[in-house]
Image (spheres, helix red, strand yellow):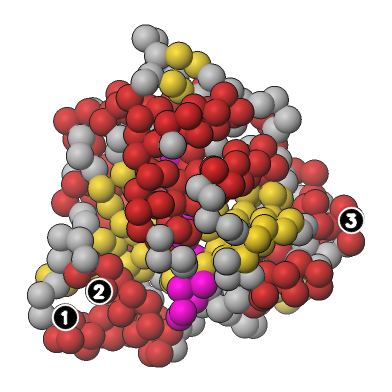
Amino acid sequence: MKICILPGDGIGPEITAEAVRVLEALDLKFEMEEALLGGAAVDATADPYPEATRKLAREADAVLLGAVGGPKWDTLPREQRPERGLLGIRKDLGLFANLRPAVLYPELANASSLKPEVVAGLDILIVRELTGDIYFGQPRGIEVRDGERFGFNTMHYTESEIRRIGRVAFEAARKRNKRLCSVDKMNVLETTQLWRDVMIELAPEYPDVELSHMLVDNAAMQLVRAPKQFDVMVTGNMFGDILSDEASMLTGSIGMLPSASLDANNKGLYEPSHGSAPDIAGQGIANPLATILSVAMMLRYTFGQENAALRVENAVKKVLAQGLRTGDIFEPGTTKVGTKQMGDAVLAAL
């Protein structure tokens, strides 16, 4: 079982170090090798997704990523920016299905920006299409037209791309509470009219799953009004990017949310949903739990190690029940700890 470790930028090296310690403690004989991605790769090779990383990622069974990006690289040409490395590896490995769970741990109910009674028991899974949509559509660019700068991007989806992600979402809903909400903007965008049409065509294949539809602006509102109405949500790349970050804050901190990006054979890239947080990098205060929970998703989806996945998730629950908190989820009456201390506690709980 070969894992490619990509620490990345900012707090990435700190949080992936704790996740690697958890993997090592499981004694499942993983072969792990590090490589560069994002800004760290740009600094070393001038390429955000260098060939050595590409080779290792292709050979690995799974990839564990910390985070990429930071203001240090914002002035570089767009093709050299760290985010191009992330988009590049997703496209290169065919990672079309992004799974982002938003689960509220009971101990963190007061950390949410919403009233505890609104979010208590929250458990949503957002399924985001990851390799199409406006993020990858051509043509795109900035050019001069009629004497002024003109920016343009192209949103498009093929029927097969929509059908592929739709099946992932229906299958996920089938294993949960059998409710699937498809999010689009069909009243304005033809691309998402096709999205809704294909989802409706898929529905008869899953008669045990209740399919509903919601416009993205309403979905954004409903996530903060009554989030527990949702079970599984499925949507395109851009809408999924925005909605999954919104959902993450319902749980108290984006530092608690893992994610998985999978290909058709469940090879996956696993990463926390948060960014590189360069403002706190190197201080030893970042929350490693989202990365550790991403390891649990890796164990479950790529390696089929359900018992090991549950061990990791239960260890995180135990640590939270003990009252240990990093700064992002700290509240009076709990004990504030740093990145390594939190990792130590999870290892002890394991």
Q: Which residues are magenta?
A: 256-267
Residue placed under numbered mark 3 in the picture: 44
| Residue 310 located left or right of residue 178 | right
Q: CA distance from mark 2 to mark 3?
A: 42 Å
Q: Quadrant of the C terminus?
A: top left
User: Is residue 247 positioned above or below 298 on the image?
Assistant: above
Residue type highlighted by circle 3: Ala
User: Which quarter of the figure has residue 312?
Assistant: top left
Query: Residue 189: where, in percent of width, then height?
Result: 38, 76
Residue 241 visible, this orientation? no
Q: In the rendered structure, are the residues bearing label 1 and label 2 in contact, judged by CB atoms less than 8 Å apart? A: yes
Task: Based on the picture, tell me whether residue 78 belongs to the magenta stretch.
Answer: no
Residue placed under numbered mark 1 in the picture: 206
Residue drawn at point x = 36 percent, y = 65 percent: 127
Q: Earlier in the sequence, mark 1 or mark 3?
A: 3
Residue type highlighted by circle 2: Phe
Task: Based on the picture, tell me whether residue 259 belongs to the magenta stretch.
Answer: yes
User: Is residue 55 positioned above or below 118 on the image?
Assistant: below
Residue drawn at point x = 35 percent, y = 30 percent: 318
Residue drawn at point x = 72 percent, y = 46 percent: 9
Q: Earlier in the sequence, mark 2 or mark 3?
A: 3
Q: Secondary structure at mark 1?
A: loop
Q: In the rendered structure, are the residues bearing label 1 and label 3 in contact, judged by CB atoms less than 8 Å apart? A: no
Residue placed under numbered mark 2 in the picture: 170
